[in-house]
Amino acid sequence: MVAVIVAASLISGACSTGLLALINKALHREYPVHLLAWLFAGIALLKLLTSLASDLLLVRFAFETMGRLRADLIRRILAVPLRKLEELGASRILANLTDDGDRINNALLILPHLATNAAMLAGGALYLGWLSWKAL
């Protein structure tokens, strides 16, 4: 699931770079306007769909993962002897159930944005290199 989410995010980032390249082509009037308009619409639609897909898949994946992690953590807490739980204290147990899970969830939510931005950076660098090696 993570691979699909990252792949959709990478495609979304590549589409962003493609849109920038098309805008550059339109400014220099290198191709017919109607062709650029159709390409722009197609790439923008692909960008929208891949961005939406990665976000929806990520939400589903995050909920499922957090549910499994919390259920596993609760099973492990219930397996600990009562004496040990009393030594640890309620505050540590509650912190494990709430704060730690939220941190993992936040880390999961960053993945698509990281992949999208990495694809935009790499695509932008490649396009800049294609336009001018000196500028790159």
Image (cartoon, rainbow, N blue to C red):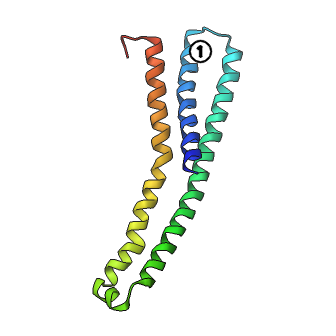
- Relative placement, left or right, of 118 versus 23 is left
Which residue is at 53% across, 34% downward? 13
The image position of residue 131, as x and y in percent, is 46, 12
Q: Nearer the viewer, residue 66 or 26?
A: 66
Q: Quadrant of the C terminus?
A: top left
Q: According to the image, label 1 marks what residue?
A: 26
- Relative placement, left or right, of 42 versus 51 is right
Residue 27 location, quadrant: top right
Q: Residues within 10 Å of mark 1 (few under 14, many from 20)?
A: some
Residue 97 location, quadrant: bottom left
Which residue is at 62% across, 45% downward? 52
User: Taking 132 as reference, is 88 above or below it?
Assistant: below
Which residue is at 45% across, 35% downward? 118
The image position of residue 15, as x and y in percent, is 58, 30
User: Taking 59 as reference, is 123 above or below it?
Assistant: above
The image position of residue 63, as x and y in percent, is 56, 63
The image position of residue 77, as x and y in percent, is 42, 81
Q: Nearer the viewer, residue 16 or 23?
A: 16
Q: Amino acid at mark 1?
A: Ala
Mark 1: which secondary structure? Answer: helix
